[in-house]
Image (cartoon, rainbow, N blue to C red):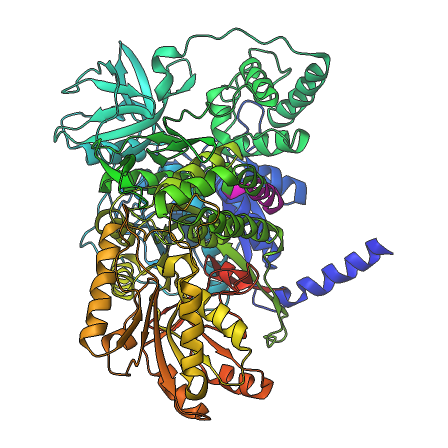
Amino acid sequence: MLWTAGKIVRKFSTTSSYLQNKLKLAIIGQSLFGQEVYTNLRKQGHKVVGVFTVPDKDGKADPLAVAAEKDGTPVFKFPRWRVKGQPIAEVVDTYCSVGAELNVMPFCSQFIPMNVIDHPKHGSIIYHPSLLPLHRGASAINWTLIHGDKRAGFSVFWADDGLDTGPILLQRECPVEPNDTVDTLYNRFLFPEGIKAMVESVQMIADGKAPRIPQSEEGASYEGIQKKSNAKVNWCQPAEDIHNWIRGHDKVPGAWALIHGQAVTLYGSSMLGGSVPPGEPLPIEGASQPGIVSKNGLVLFGSDGNALLVKNLQFEDGKMIPASKYFTSGESASVELTDDEKKTAEQIRLIWKGILSNVAAIEDSTDFFKSGAASMDVVRLVEEVKQCCPSVLLQNEDVYMASTFHDFIQMFVRKMRGEEQEEELIVDYVTKEVNNMTVKMPYQCFINGKFEDAENAKTYATVNPSDGSVICQVSYCSVGDVDRAVAAAKEAYEEGPWGRMNPRDRGSLLYRLADLMEECQEELATIEALDSGAVYTLALKTHVGMSIQTFRYFAGWCDKIQGKTIPINQARPNRNLTFTKKEPLGVCAIVIPWNYPLMMLAWKSAACLAAGNTLVLKPAQVTPLTALKFAELSVKAGIPKGVINILPGSGGMVGQRLSDHPDVRKLGFTGSTPIGKQIMKSCALSNLKKVSLELGGKSPLIIFSDCDMDKAVRMGMSSVYFNKGENCIAAGRLFVEESIHDEFISKVVEEIKKMKIGDPLDRSTAHGPQNHKAHLDKLLEYCDIGVKEGATLVYGGKQVDRPGFFMEPTVFTDVEDHMFIAKEESFGPVMVVSKFKNGDVDGVLHRANDTEYGLASGVFTRDINKAMYVSERLEAGTVFVNTYNKTDVASPFGGFKQSGFGKDLGEDALSEYLKTKAVTVEY
């Protein structure tokens, strides 16, 4: 029954294709590209009357021939179409007998006679992988990269008697990425989009809508075929030209250089940003200076003194190694296989045999590539082995590194045993005996899974606000460090296991990270107290506790991110299916403030990682230590290298470069409104990256006379003095109804006098030091302005007479709407109180909304109708009713107006780190 239903569905799903105009086609060409074009044209209902391809090689048929023979399509394998420039009559006659109306030539390495090209009613169309008239000739992709073109693409053109000179039917283009190779450009764009374009072109011809646009000779170029013999690197040119030469030959035919008398092929080139890493010199014939074998790869130099980095090397015998292991790549001892491993090896031997069908038997010495395997066979091998052993993370590069069956099995078994895992994390700590524990704090920047000094070796002091002492020197990152971190994040996203990981597995890693944070919560809270002045008990519950909850919450979202199916108008007689997919953005930058160093990291990075992105995070310059400790825990949790990068340093340098960087696709920022505006401008001018901003606030809290007074006092104080007033949503202005104003102030002052100000690590302390000296000075100036403008200073307003950056909890009353302290945020422990007339609900609402900020707000009243009326009219992203500071990981958080846009927390936060793709299928 199921089989019959499937047949019925198939019949109906293909009917619409056959109602369109269809042609009889001859496919002339070869390769997997030719096979895909052939298959998709048949799916569209066109009749392929003959496939003309190359003879079998080493007993192995071309993929196009395999597909056509399987379908029963006539297949002809002519070794040549011409002899001494003249068409072979028997070959031409055989071709003519199939009766094609159009020749489709997706990829053809043979010379086809003009009487074949012109024979069909509609002539012949050819696919060419360049934007004609640029790069005519057989090595168009190579030359696109060698010349450093910023745009690449392909052309579908009408064949004529010239060399790639016929009229254009269709063209498509794409940007060239800085480190694109022939392989990446082909696989990312030229292959998949080229197949679609060839099918589209045939249908345009069938419908009589195909243009013939003459090629201009202006700007036309023709370059010769690139072969191994002419792919040697010329060192007498700038580094960027050498980089382009290497990537323009990667993987075929492979640029090479003479090293110790041997031709060594170079793969995986990228421009080196920043300083040259240390390593061993390696003389290279013809180069002005030796290369350097570093832990990152082989550093090479151009004639301009600039450098590039090569990741992999291949020797004349076909063996490929990481360039970083040039001096240590001797044969390692073979591992002895267990009985179970031997069974697995035999399963893999069968997979090799299935791919290398032309080889009689797979011996230990059988070389995958010398047996005729190509790049698509590598993909097949990797995927089939993954199905056999899904627990082993295997990559295409592993096949190139171990091309014989023996080496492949040895490599695979080592991976299966965990012997080829990432090298152990090395951390230089600053240690302190404090809070009845030994606190171990990383202080270097964290890039690509490693702690390392900034490229310029610069450092700066991070200070304990409790006494003004220096905790330690921290790496001061530069623009070069940002570029390296972004490159690492991009590679991790595009090529590493993170981008390919099952969402549920990604969630498991985030759960593990949350567990490790919980195991280390006392140490994290202690570091937070030392570095930011947070009271330890608050740091334990909120700074660290909510961070753990945030990662657990978003870990649960990883496998629940989904799109929708959407009913659309059907283009009769066709039918359509439209659905959406939620996809990660790529490399995201996150810039966080100093008031909640770890919690702000968690609020943004948990959603970012759950969505599948990689990130580069800049902690606040004055509070970097918990972010660096978090980086250490992320490695222990198993987060792959490059996924998380932490860069301490200045906002003007690190933050600005992240805003400007063309490879960053999203920037999330929490901080001041002026800086947020500058970030938004930079993000727009650079590459129009997505932005979310959580900015300044002047949150109003309205207290009506019918409130629960004790609760209003308690929560009103919390709204201002929570976390020393260094709180994004702090109530920047309290409006108290006239009839209860004096009682409210009296009770607040009474409670302030009970607050213990002191050492954040003392469990009885209620109020710790301000975050840093400059902020304390700003708060004192803020209070001076309030007094000068005529507000009444009821309590505080001064620095506490003790070491450190302590500020008295402060209360101002009689604050008029025009005053500076009524309009501007203090971001400190300063309560700003204004009266409003009894019963004047609309009047106080007008005053509360008379601000350019809209982050949070609050209302205290026992009248539920009044509470709902006020909450509906307050212009703020969050409204608290009879409570304050009650945030939760499941509830979205973000502001209106100049308090920014975008949300942290809750399901809404995921949307900030995802893009929506709509897909429409016709069937």
Q: Is residue 852 above or below residue 616?
A: below
Q: Provide the residue span drawn in magenta.
A: 499-511
Q: Main secondary structure of the magenta part?
A: helix
x 51%, y 60%: residue = 905
> Could you say where residue 14 lies in the image, as x and y percent from the top left?
67, 62
Relative image position of residue 8 (x, y in whole percent):
78, 62
**Residue 886 visible in the shown view:** yes
Quadrant housing the N terminus: bottom right
Q: Nearer the viewer, residue 521 or 167?
A: 521
- In the depicted structure, whether residue 109 falls above or below residue 716: above
In this rendering, is residue 702 above or below 553?
below
What is the quadrant of residue 18 in the picture? bottom right
x 36%, y 26%: residue: 428
Foreground of the two, 834 or 289: 834
- Using residue 723 as the reference point, say whether residue 520 is left or right of it: right
The quadrant holding residue 237 is: top left
User: Which residue occupies the extreme right position in the image?
Assistant: 1
